[in-house]
Image (tube, rainbow, N blue to C red):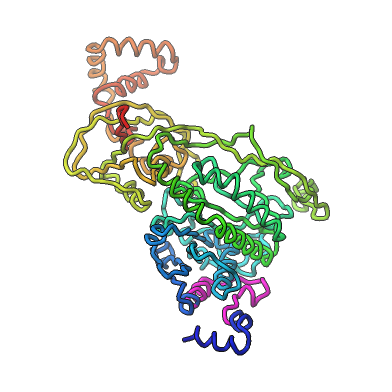
Amino acid sequence: MKKLLLIAVACLFGSEIIAQESYETLFEKSQGLKTPSYEEVIEYFALLAKDFEHVKMVEMGVTDAGLPLHVVIYDTKGEFDPGIWHDHDRLVVYINNAIHPGEPDGIDASMMLLRDILLGKKSFPDNVVLAITPVYNIGGHLNRGSHSRVNQNGPEEFGFRGNARNYDLNRDFIKADTKNARSFHQIFNWMKPHVFIDTHVSNGADYQHVMTLISTQHDRLGGQLGAYLEKSLNPELYSRMKDRGFPMIPYVNAYGSKPEDGWPQFKDIGRYSSGYAALFKTLSFMPETHMLKSYDQRVASTYALFEVFVDMFERDGEKIVSMSKADREAVKQQSVFELNHKSDRSKFKLMEFHGYESGQKPSEISGHPRLFYDRQKPFSTEIKYYDAYESGLTIEKPKAYIIPQGWHTVIDNLRRNGVQVKALQQDSSMVVTVYQIKDFQTSQRPYEGHFMHSNVTVEKSSESITFRKGDVVVMMDQEANNFIIEVLEPEGEDSFFAWNYFDMILQSKEGYSAYVFEDLAAAFLKENPSLRQELERAKKEDEKLASNGSAQLRWVYDRSPWKEKEHNRYPVYRLEYNGNR
């Protein structure tokens, strides 16, 4: 009824004036100084869903704040069903806002974008579906103030980076410690977007650009989409943003050096939103406006980038869907996967950078030299942007992984992410590859609730193991193969092992009393003279071992039948192809 009344009044007095007043945002009312509270954001999108039949707002999952996540869907065909979208080859675009609520630019830009589409001010392709999560980090958004980002230039009040449990949600996409991340998994794999845009605000160096951009790393994305992103989409985004008065630069990843010296592309591994999305063959982006620019400029640049994306979707939507389908099908058959990518400094692109001269001056606090940027001395130059990455580890996929059912946290995570797992219907003996964790390093300080492992090395062996009914098999013929490899191969830098899912195996549960085991060990060496010879060689090569009787006893124990097999034995097993694919 309200929509009909608006139309009638608009016919008499002019549609643009009346409609604009009816759906004016707080950002607009405040001349770009304010952003709405969580309640106001949800009320605004609820109003659009109520007044326009092509908008639907749904609740999907809960968050650590005890409130549900929302997804606002704009669908000109009124289908509101991802299965139908994909059956009809419609492009699915998903915008996620306020993962860091102190960075609310995307909230206001999304509100205005959807409104302007609905009012006919902005065209939008019929074959594209737009989905928006208005506020992802609800707990952080409720924690409003004006001081949580001390250097940021507006708005007047904004939220806090940490969520309701003080997690940084843009580090949680693999480990999924939060309800937010677990709900996001379900949303993302229900929707299966072709394009994912996660809005942010940057910090760091000062420069003239209002908008910077993290595009997912094209070498990690791979396939047709990776080539399209590097060769076509990225250049077009930068060109069109320049035409709109917001010349863009890649996210200024120049820590420890001057921006004019160039920088490597930010490597968005799976813990980050865009890196996570790329594991599922999704074009993904993190727009990062510059926090020192005024809030109205930042929101305007985000809105302009949204417009550019919409233009590109109208032109290339069918192509993106086609490439995405091909890549998602190809990954089912892909045999070798790359992990632990490293920047390739032999390759770079020249980018036009607009900066400010930097220098040193005495600190008024300490008197020591401090960095400053002189806005009275702007400059423009070409910088080297190192956007190529090469593999640090290659993994040949197995036919399947087998996971004992007791590791339910691992299995639950896989299922949330759309991975198909099958339970064994009876006890079964199989020859599998077993990983023994040989070495790793552990961080000395906590990082997002974890002491992470890195530089992991493994030793492989082939064993016949009897698995129980109910243990699960993960066949490697799935669209989610990238994700599966990323999280289940323990040497991966963002694997479940790295994130402490398997720390229980790193502590031995049994041991020995040395005075008793001495006699058993001596008898064992007499029965195994080759092992005695190996021990003697080891002592000659290692003075510390030779001078330490307890260490020699441990050496024998570790090679004896009494050594517990579970210690350092990685409880995810590879069923190999045996040469036949």
Name the residue nearer the viewer: 447 or 348.
348
Which residues are drawn in magenta? 22-47
Name the residue nearer the viewer: 25 or 477.
477
Name the image quarter holding the C terminus: top left
Image height check: is 3 above or below 135?
A: below
Q: Is residue 338 magenta?
A: no
Marks counted in the figure total: 0
Name the residue nearer the viewer: 26 or 577.
577
Image height check: is 34 above or below 536?
A: below
Residue 420 is left or right of residue 160, and the answer is left
Residue name at image x 58 percent, y 62 percent: 102
Residue name at image x 59 percent, y 44 percent: 230
Residue 462 is left or right of residue 275, and the answer is left
Q: Residue furthest left?
A: 426
Name the residue nearer the viewer: 77 or 523.
77
Q: How far across and how far down the image is residue 343, in percent?
A: 59, 36
Q: How far across and how far down the image is residue 396, in percent?
A: 40, 32
Image height check: is 550 above or below 90?
A: above
Residue 297 is left or right of residue 274, and the answer is right
Residue name at image x 69 percent, y 40 percent: 384
Q: Is residue 45 magenta?
A: yes
**Residue 362 shows in the view:** no
Q: How far across and how far down the image is residue 539, in percent?
A: 40, 13
Q: How far across and how far down the image is residue 366, in percent?
A: 75, 49
Where residue 123 sits, quadrant-wise, is bottom right
Where residue 334 sits, quadrant-wise, is top left
